[in-house]
Amino acid sequence: MEVTPARVTVLVLAVLTLIFIFQNTDDTEIRLLIPEVTMPLWAALLATALVGALCGAYFMRRRR
């Protein structure tokens, strides 16, 4: 696998995202439509990041 500036940028962004997620460990209240749940903020951020990554991968694959 070739090291390109784009791959390095994606890797750096992924590491910074993970650092941001795991630095935020307090519990928070989250409302999803009707139910309200209390969960660690890192879990909500990680779930949101994963959903965003899956959506991005889907649309990139669909574009080809």
Image (cartoon, rainbow, N blue to C red):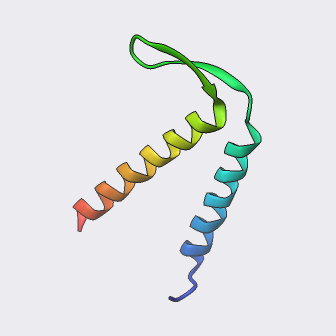
Between residues 6 and 14, which one lies in front from this camera angle? 14
Q: Nearer the viewer, residue 9 or 25?
A: 25
Q: Residue at left 24%, top 62%?
A: 63
| In the image, residue 46 above or below residue 58 | above
Image quarter for residue 13? Answer: bottom right
Q: In the picture, residue 44 is in which quadrant?
A: top right
On the image, the x and y values in percent for residue 64 come to 23, 68
Q: Position of residue 37 (x, y in %)?
A: 53, 17
The location of residue 42, given as percent across then percent down, is 65, 38
Quick check: 56 above or below 7? Answer: above
Question: x, y percentage for residue 20?
Answer: 71, 45
Q: Nearer the viewer, residue 14 or 44?
A: 44
Residue 52 sits above or below residue 34 on the image: below
Q: How many numbered markers are drawn?
A: 0
Instruction: Single out the residue that lies furthest toward the bottom.
Output: 2
Q: In the rendered view, would you say 40 is above or below 57? A: above
Q: Residue at x 76, y 42 (%)?
A: 23
**Identity of the residue drawn at 47% across and 48% down:** 50
